[in-house]
Image: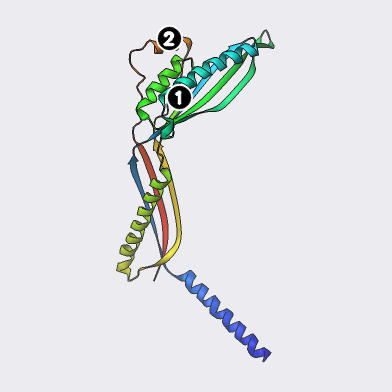
Amino acid sequence: MKKKLFAGIVLFAVVLMSGAFALAEDGFINIYLSKTKELNPDKAEIVISVETSDKSSQVAADENKKISLNVQKKIKSLINAQNGDYVITSNYSLSPRNEYKNGKTVFDKYVAINTITVYTKSLDKVSLIVDSAIKEGATRISNLNFKVSDYDKACTALLTELVAQSKDRANKLSAPAGTTVKGVKSINTTCSMQGGTSFRKFYSANALGATASADTATPIESGKLILNATVDVSYFLK
C-alpha cells in the first residue's frame, strides 16, 4: 500500500513538472509602444521668498514678518479659496551670516528668509500674483510650475489605450505564424510629464523699483504639458 502511495506521489510530481516545463516552453511575443499627449495645465505652483537682514536678529525677523504678512495678504486677495486656491508657509529660517576678512571668519549679519508657496487654478492671475508679491517686498520668485490636476487619471487612460493597442498588434503579428495571444507574461509601464514653465529670477533692489513702475505685467505663458507613456508587454502565444 505504501509503495502504491509513493508511486502515485511521484507520478503526480512528474505531471506537475511536465506542466511547468510546457508553460516555460510556450512561445511569447514582446510588444513595446509609446505615445505622447498634449494637456492643458489647470493649476500653478508659485514659490515666493522674502529675505531681510540686519545686525540684530530681532530687527531682521520683525522686518521679515511685516513684509511677509503684506505679501500674503495681497496674494490672498487675488486668489479664489472657494476654487481650491491657497497659500502656505513652506519654509522659514533665521540664521547668522559670516564673511571672511583678513584671514578670519567674522560675523556679518542675521538673515531671515520666509518662503511661501501659492497654489492657484486662476492661471490668468499668475502674472498679477508675481508682480504684486514683488511690489509688496518679496525678493525672490524661486519657482513657478504649471500642472494638471488629473495627472493620474490622464496617465491611466493613456496607458490603458496603449495596452489595448499592444494586444491587437501582438495578435496581428502572430497570426501569420498560426498563433494567437493566450495570456500576459509581463507588463511594464512608465508615465511622465514634461513641459510647463519653470520661472527663476532674483529681484534686487533696483529690479524691485523697475518692476513696481512697469506699465505691463510680467509675461508668463503656461504653454502645453506633454504626457509621455510607454508600455512593454510580453504575451504568451498558443
The quarter in which the N terminus is drawn is: bottom right
Q: Secondary structure at mark 1?
A: helix
Q: Earlier in the sequence, mark 1 or mark 2?
A: 1
> Residue at the location (35% across, 47% down)?
35
Picture coordinates of residue 184, whole percent (x, y): 43, 63
Q: Which scheme is used to colour this image of the protein?
A: rainbow
Q: Looking at this view, name the residue that lies furthest to the top.
A: 102
Picture coordinates of residue 223, whole percent (x, y): 34, 32
The reply to whether residue 184 is in sight is yes
> Residue at the location (38% across, 46% down)?
154
Amino acid marked by disc 1:
Lys
The quarter in which the C terminus is drawn is: bottom left
Q: Give the image quarter of residue 104.
A: top right
Distance between the Cα atoms at labels 1 and 2?
23 Å
Work out whether 140 lies above or below 80.
above
Mark 1 lies on residue: 76
Q: Looking at this view, name the residue that lies furthest to the right.
A: 104
Q: Looking at this view, name the residue that lies furthest to the front.
A: 82
Relative depth, front residue between 120 and 11 = 120
Left or right: where does residue 9 sit relative to residue 217?
Answer: right
Work out whether 89 lies above or below 33.
above
Relative depth, front residue between 34 and 90 = 90
Left or right: where does residue 111 sit relative to residue 145?
Answer: right
Mark 2 lies on residue: 209
Work out whether 118 lies above or below 227.
above
Amino acid marked by disc 2:
Gly
